[in-house]
Each structure stands twice: as structure tokens, then as C-alpha cells.
Amino acid sequence: MIHLDMTGRNVEITPALRNFAAEKLAKLERLLVGPIEAHVVLGIEKHRQFAEIQLKSKTGIFSGHQETGDLYASIGEVADKLERQALKHKEKIRDHKHRRGPRDPEIAATIEANVAAEVESQARTNGDTPTRLHRRASYRVRPMGVEDAILELEESGEELILFRLTENDQVCAIYRRRDGDLVLVEAR
């Protein structure tokens, strides 16, 4: 729900202007979290007609200013600017959350244990001596689908790809067996 506060400078705030502004700002409800407060300042100075809007929500404060020859056009353009700002902010928050890797030691230990168990299992079935497991200092876990992880494995030349499934944030690994097949390891 948007709480709309409008101020007019050398212009009367008509119900039509108020409804138009409310309609344009309603699109932002799907992008912003919590109650939204909007302060709209409309003004006319000589031949310039401007709209200035400031939005406050739980996720941030967004503002924009536009001058045109028509108040309705100014309101529409500022609302579009605010929508782009809110969308960019939402994507930034989403990307920041997805960049975080498995900081939980239990998740890292589970992945390591699953990979070690699979390597040992492969060694037993092939009659080879078990391969030693070498630890890697750090590994960036990115969100991606299984198909993207397979492509990444093929292109990078790495032996193992750790990733977080985009569908459910589950940590997984893909590696290539000696026979050339790929193995998907999922953390529980």
C-alpha cells in the first residue's frame, strides 16, 4: 500500500493529478517491500512543469526529478525512473544474496564427504588404490542450473565444479569420472 502525499507549487492538486500519480506509482508496490511512503511535489515555473517524487520503503529511499512541458508527462517519466531504480536495487540485493557461498562449515564438510565417498567408491569398483583427497583453500559457489554447471566444467577444464542450484539453493558438485561420465553430487 502506498501512502501518497502531494504538494503543489503554483499548481492546484486536482483529483485527476492525484489519481494519475497513484496509478503510476502502484507499479512500484511489486518491487518494494513493506509500506511505501511517496511524497510528490508538482510545480509550474514559467514554461517549465516539473514533478519531483521521493519514495521511502523498508528496502530503501528512491527519488527522481523531471521537467517537461506537461505535468502528466513529468509524473510518468519520474515514475519510470523510480521503477528502474527499484528494479536495479532489487537485482543488486538478489545478486548479493546469491554470491554468498557455503559459509556454513557443515555444508562444506558434507560436500567434501560426499565427494570423498564417491572417489573411494570409484576406486573400489575399478580395483585401484584409493585416491588421496587434496583440500582446496577456497572455492566460489555460484548459483546456476545443472546444464550451466556442465558447460562450465567443460569450458574451464576444472576437475570439479561446485555450484548452488538456482531452483532451490541446494549446494551441488559435478565432476567427471575416469570413464568420462559426469557425476552430480547433492548436499543433503
Image (cartoon, rainbow, N blue to C red):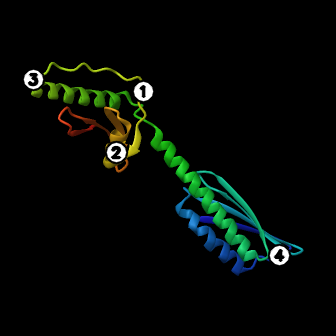
Name the N-terminal-most of marks 3 and 4.
4
Check disc 4 and give the amino acid type. Val
Residue ID for mark 2: 151
SS for callout 3: loop
C-alpha gap between disc 2 and disc 4: 60 Å
Name the N-terminal-most of marks 2 and 1.
1
Q: Is residue 177 above or below residue 75?
A: above
The one nearer the camera, 120 or 77, is 120
SS for callout 4: loop
In percent of width and height, residue 131 lies at 21, 20
Count the labels in the image. Answer: 4
C-alpha gap between disc 1 and disc 4: 61 Å
Name the N-terminal-most of marks 3 and 1.
3
SS for callout 2: helix
Q: Residue at 72%, 60% (x, y): give it.
A: 64
Judged by depth in the image, the label closer to the viewer, 2 or 1, is 2
C-alpha gap between disc 3 and disc 2: 30 Å
Judged by depth in the image, the label closer to the viewer, 2 or 4, is 2
Residue ID for mark 3: 127
Res. 14 image quadrant: bottom right
In percent of width and height, residue 127 lies at 9, 23
Residue ID for mark 1: 138
Q: Which mark is residue 11?
A: 4
